[in-house]
Amino acid sequence: MFKFYDPKDEADLARVENALKKGGVEYFVTSCKAGSGIVAEIEVAEEDIPKAEELIGIGKS
């Protein structure tokens, strides 16, 4: 699994998770406490990165 996306907040995390689920991309969410909040990171398999980027609109011009 490779680091794919750092959600800005809970709503962003939910949006990205929903898009990945609907697109059939397997992912893993890691989280840790940082300061006064929780920092989350979404990881996907290397071969799924292009599809995951397309699903959430990363890299579009």
Image (cartoon, grey):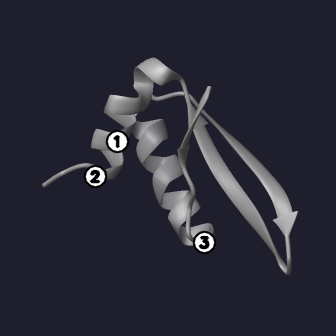
Is the residue under label 1 in contact with that under label 2 (CB below 8 Å)?
Answer: yes
Residue carrying label 1: 53
Three-letter code for the amino acid on which mark 3 is drawn: Asp
Position of residue 39 measured from the top left corner of the image (x, y, whole percent): 73, 63
- Disc nearer the start of the sequence (3/2): 3
Q: Secondary structure at mark 1?
A: helix
Q: Where is the C terminus found, in terms of image quarters?
A: bottom left
Residue drawn at x 46%, y 29% as measured from the top left: 25
Residue at the extreme left = 61
Q: Which mark is residue 36?
A: none
Spatial CA distance of label 1 from label 3 is: 18 Å
Above or below, 4 relative to 7? above
Horizontal and vertical percent position of residue 37: 80, 75
Amino acid type at image mark 2: Gly
- Circle 1: residue type: Glu
- Distance from the alpha carbon under mark 3 to that under mark 2: 17 Å
Q: Looking at the rendered structure, which numbered label has been put on residue 9?
A: 3
In the image, what residue occupies the spot 25% across and 49% down? 59
